[in-house]
């Protein structure tokens, strides 16, 4: 019997190839999207959960307050962690990480720039689960200048040699001894690294200051039963005691559970760009809706198709089939089809996983599929879809009287309204997705084309590797300028695009509490010109004034506005009480037109520019005026080698660097574009199938109409009208939904494009056009059929 | 074998009741070959459907081998379909997706006959109907007469006591029709009770009783007319 069902099922699939492919491919595409999104979500929620002590580990940060002080930053100063460990009894252990920074490392002839590493306390290896393949985790990071490296790093430098105990030379001056080999740090960590150096090797003049040198990512492990709030309060008391006059009650010492950092923490100076739950929800919702569309199609088409099986049901009943047997048969058939779709979906998933992973900025792989929860839910879901889509034919078809079925009086009409409702829903969802994609694209092009207030094009950035060349910067500049095509050269301590610093300052004549948070760029005389910024008041720094070095400030318009001096800005002065600087009561020399020194998501904040001593410079920016970049870079390299023969020159393009600020959003936009394409494809598949079905149902009617003199257009109109009306209705429903959703998305950007009418017009055109294609193809096909054939019956 | 007493079948539409069958009293003995005749709309097919448990009467009593059919459950009815009644239709009603062999085999599947036994039974009937060569063809590859042969074979394979045929020759030309009728005759001689609906006097003449109907009522009974 079962074999008989299988035969019927497969022959039916084969006989109705179009329906079957629409059904199977549509459902498979929907399932695949859903599985991909599921994998993405499970990956994003898996962060830092591999640590054995994950429930006891917290990161100590400050939240609230002003970030020119010490608030709202992911890292703190060195003494905080030490004090926390010694003074708070609930804290079991503590470890701190400091960025190592990129340096040239060498073993024998193997030289590489290595930047992905940290200085870390030796307790790191015991608190976190970073297993060592070789070396003793208890002692590996004890001694100064110890380094533990991961396998790739070891392979890169040492090849087949055993790295343990070997020496790596850093910048040709420091020697690190390899004391351990790490397993690769899993990518689902809120920070990853290729190497760790003992924190005892790290020095800085301000390392013991409670406020200034906040470079330490500090983690604590709490004892069993410790209350987070109590630890936080004790920490706050310690801060109040030690920060003295700088204590700011608005900045709160906060413990973040490490497992929640990746999805919820968005502080200044995070170790890596974290995700947020909103994109998780967004993808989740879109994935769910696509699956829903596919399921609706599937159920719709299965039930529509089912009425063509009425005759079979009737025959089977007269032969003695009981209701149960018929229900089993139809349910079985739809389960077979769903499982075929599932297999196809898994193949599609595997094919598209790499691109999905890249676009969602989530490096997950298909091993997540083996997660029993995911696997289980996929199976349950598939069963559910199969069951739901088989239910209707199974229960409804098996009930009518066989005599009426065989006579042909039985008509399946009851669910027509439902079917229409589902079409409307599908198109509403598609319209919402199309609209959202369009707005997202518009926002990205808006960000790309918006006047940044400076010129990011045709600027080459070169990081300084050897700071002993800094005193020669004038000479380097001159030689660079000799290269044809080079317009300007500027040395700076940091760059726009997120590199700005926050340091305490004093604006004369303004009470401390009215001083806005101020960002800083440490630049030289040519910076403003190199980046094409505009001076709106006063003057740019100039070599004509020998006093400009550490001798004055440029402010942006926002800074001037927020400082709100009552008198002429250019008559004001600012002090910079910072040990390494000699900048007390220096004048404001000029005002720079506002420029986007961070991403478009953020509003332009007050910023000031000043010329530091040349030892502060770490970046060279070269403005070129030709597209022949290769030649220029070759010229730059030649000059570079004269000054720094040790480090190879590395050049990046500033516009790409700046573009990375919006990379996540842009990728998300691209991904949503693809998902939208799938959604509308599925919706059209459904429409195509339904129209084909209704054309088939009405073959006889069409034949009679043609015999009676109806034109082809008349028939096409007859068949399309009804469905196109549904699409229109879907459009009307979908527009407000998408407006609501997309304006929410836009709100994350400080600088937004408008949602103009053209978006809706365009959406309308796409929807109607695609729907027309699906509907008219079938309608025309039916209309062109020779009536002699359609009227011939057995 | 069959006893219908005061059978009514009607449709209610708002304030009007339309009778399809009215006050039918009919007895059929085992071994009869009866033909129901009458103009279109006389209720012939409805009567046949009621006889075959495919439709229920609105009132009246129906005894099948002294079993009150009007009290039977769905399940019991389908038991009878499996073992006692075979249907032959004007439009053959074969399942398009199944081959000749599989169509004939299907009733046996519902009766849960074992595989080997099933093969033997199907082979036997294919042989008897001279259709062995056609067993792997699909219905649309056969002529109408051949399809109807398959339909009859399928009705017969469960060795039913009663065959109900609704215009079995309505779609066939005369040679094919005669073939089917001769087949019915020989089956009847083997003891199978046959009731057919037909418009054709000629087809009716193969049977041994004619039941005439008009406007949902039995007009007259002509038992053993053919003799």
Image: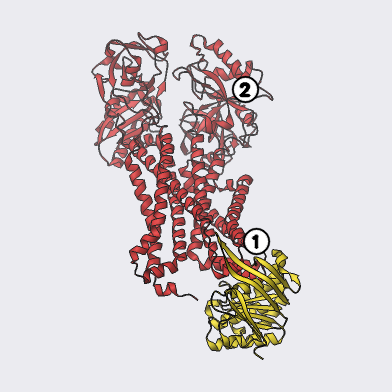
Chain colours: A red, B yellow
Picture quarter containing residue A723? bottom left
- Where's residue B45, x and y in %? 59, 74
| Disc 2 element | helix
Q: Nearer the viewer, residue A408 or B60?
A: B60
Residue at x 52% of width, y 42% of height = A284
Dot 2 surroundings within 10 Å: few (below 14), some, or many (20 or more)? some
Q: Is residue A432 above or below residue B68?
A: above
- Where's residue A540, x and y in %? 26, 21
Quarter of the picture containing the N terminus of chain B is bottom right
Picture quarter containing residue B79? bottom right
Residue at x 48% of width, y 44% of height = A286
Residue at x 58% of width, y 13% of height = A237
| Residue that label 2 marks | A228
Residue at x 60% of width, y 85% of height = B204
- Where's residue A39, x and y in %? 55, 45
Q: CA distance from mark 1 to mark 2?
A: 57 Å
| Residue that label 1 marks | A328
Chain letter of the residue beneath label 1 in the structure image: A
Q: Is A760 on the left-hand or right-hand side of B186? A: left
Q: Nearer the viewer, mark 1 or mark 2?
A: 1
């Amino acid at each position: 019997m079962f074999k008989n069902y299988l035969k019927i099922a497969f022959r039916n699939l084969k006989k109705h190839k179009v329906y079957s492919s629409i059904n199977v491919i549509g459902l498979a595409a929907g399932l695949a999207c859903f599985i991909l999104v599921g994998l993405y979500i499970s990956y994003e929620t898996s962060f830092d959960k591999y640590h054995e002590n994950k429930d006891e580990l917290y990161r100590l940060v400050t939240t609230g307050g002003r970030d020119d002080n010490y608030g709202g930053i992911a890292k703190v100063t060195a003494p905080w962690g030490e004090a926390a460990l010694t003074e708070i009894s609930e804290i079991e252990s503590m470890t701190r990480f400091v960025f190592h920074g990129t340096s040239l490392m060498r073993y024998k002839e193997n030289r590489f720039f290595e930047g992905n590493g940290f200085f870390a306390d030796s307790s790191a290896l015991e608190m976190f689960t970073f297993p060592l393949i070789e070396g003793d985790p208890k002692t590996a990071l004890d001694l100064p200048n110890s380094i533990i490296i991961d396998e790739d790093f070891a392979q890169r430098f040492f090849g087949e040699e055993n790295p343990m105990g070997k020496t790596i030379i850093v910048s040709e001056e420091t020697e690190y001894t390899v004391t351990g080999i790490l397993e690769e740090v899993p990518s689902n960590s809120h920070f990853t690294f290729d190497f760790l150096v003992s924190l005892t090797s790290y020095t800085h003049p301000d390392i013991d200051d409670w406020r200034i040198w906040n470079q330490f990512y500090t983690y604590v492990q709490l004892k069993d039963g410790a209350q987070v709030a109590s630890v936080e309060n004790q920490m706050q008391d310690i801060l109040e005691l030690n920060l003295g006059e700088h204590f700011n009650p608005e900045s709160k010492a906060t413990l973040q559970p490490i497992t929640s950092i990746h999805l919820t923490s968005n502080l200044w100076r995070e170790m890596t760009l974290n995700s947020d739950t909103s994109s998780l929800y967004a993808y989740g919702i879109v994935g769910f809706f696509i699956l829903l569309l596919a399921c609706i199609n599937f159920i719709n088409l299965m039930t529509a198709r089912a009425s063509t099986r009425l005759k079979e049901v009737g025959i089977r009943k007269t032969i003695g089939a009981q209701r149960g047997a018929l229900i089993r048969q139809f349910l079985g058939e739809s389960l077979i089809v769903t499982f075929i779709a599932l297999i196809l979906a898994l193949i599609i998933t595997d094919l598209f996983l790499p691109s999905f992973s890249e676009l969602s900025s989530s490096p997950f792989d298909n091993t997540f599929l083996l997660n029993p929860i995911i696997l289980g839910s996929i199976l349950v879901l598939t069963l559910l879809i199969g069951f739901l889509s088989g239910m209707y034919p199974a229960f409804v078809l098996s009930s009518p009287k066989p005599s009426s079925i065989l006579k042909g009086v039985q008509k399946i009409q009851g669910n027509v309204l439902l079917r229409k409702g589902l079409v409307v829903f599908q198109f509403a969802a598609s319209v919402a997705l199309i609209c959202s994609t369009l707005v997202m694209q518009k926002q990205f092009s808006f960000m790309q084309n918006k006047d940044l207030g400076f010129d990011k094009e045709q600027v080459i950035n070169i990081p300084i590797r050897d700071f002993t060349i800094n005193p020669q910067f004038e000479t380097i500049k001159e030689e660079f300028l000799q290269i044809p095509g080079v317009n300007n050269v500027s040395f700076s301590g940091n760059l726009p695009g997120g590199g700005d610093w926050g340091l305490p300052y004093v604006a004369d004549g303004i009470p401390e509490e009215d001083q806005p948070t101020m960002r800083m760029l440490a630049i030289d005389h040519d910076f403003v010109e190199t980046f094409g910024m505009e001076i709106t008041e006063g003057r740019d720094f100039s070599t004509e004034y020998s006093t400009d070095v550490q001798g004055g400030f440029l402010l942006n318009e926002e800074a001037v506005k927020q400082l709100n001096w009552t008198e002429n800005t250019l008559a004001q002065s600012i002090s910079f009480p910072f040990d390494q600087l000699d900048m007390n009561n220096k004048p404001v020399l000029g005002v720079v037109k506002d420029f986007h020194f961070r991403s478009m998501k953020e509003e332009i904040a007050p910023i000031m520019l000043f010329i530091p001593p040349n030892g502060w410079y770490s970046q060279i920016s070269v403005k070129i005026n030709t597209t022949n970049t290769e030649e220029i870079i070759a010229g730059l390299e030649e000059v570079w080698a004269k000054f720094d023969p040790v480090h190879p020159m590395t050049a990046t393009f500033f516009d790409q660097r700046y573009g990375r600020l919006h990379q996540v959003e842009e990728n998300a936009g691209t991904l949503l574009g693809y998902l939208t394409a799938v959604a509308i494809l599925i919706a059209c598949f459904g429409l195509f199938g339904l129209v084909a079905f209704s054309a088939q149902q009405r073959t006889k009617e069409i034949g009679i109409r043609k015999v009676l003199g109806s034109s082809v257009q008349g028939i096409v109109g007859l068949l399309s009208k009804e469905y196109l009306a549904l699409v229109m209705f879907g459009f009307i429903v979908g527009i407000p939904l998408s407006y609501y959703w997309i304006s929410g998305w836009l709100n994350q950007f400080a600088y937004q494009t408008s949602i103009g009418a053209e978006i809706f017009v365009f959406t309308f055109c796409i929807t109607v056009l695609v729907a027309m294609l699906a509907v008219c193809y079938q309608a025309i096909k039916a209309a062109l059929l020779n009536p002699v054939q359609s009227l011939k019956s057995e | 074998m069959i006893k219908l007493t005061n059978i009514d079948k009607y449709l209610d539409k708002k304030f009007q009741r339309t009778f399809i069958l009215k006050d039918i009293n009919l007895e059929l003995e085992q071994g009869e070959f009866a033909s129901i005749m009458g103009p279109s709309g006389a209720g012939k097919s409805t009567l046949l459907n009621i006889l075959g448990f495919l439709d229920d009467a609105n009132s009246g009593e129906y005894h099948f081998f002294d079993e009150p059919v009007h009290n039977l459950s769905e399940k019991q009815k389908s038991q009878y379909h499996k073992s006692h009644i075979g249907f032959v239709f004007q439009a053959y009603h074969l399942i398009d997706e199944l081959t000749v062999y599989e169509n004939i085999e299907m009733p046996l599947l519902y009766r849960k006959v074992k595989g080997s036994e099933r093969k033997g039974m199907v082979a036997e009937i294919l042989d008897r109907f001279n259709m062995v060569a056609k067993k792997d063809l699909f219905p649309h590859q056969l002529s109408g007469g051949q399809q109807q042969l398959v339909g009859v074979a399928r009705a017969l394979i469960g060795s039913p006591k009663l065959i109900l045929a609704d215009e079995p020759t309505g779609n066939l030309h005369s040679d094919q029709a005669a073939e089917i009728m001769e087949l019915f005759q020989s089956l009847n001689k083997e003891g199978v009770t046959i009731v057919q609906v037909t418009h054709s006097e000629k087809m009716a003449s193969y049977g041994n009783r004619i039941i005439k109907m008009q406007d949902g009522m039995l007009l007259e009974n002509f038992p053993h007319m053919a003799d």
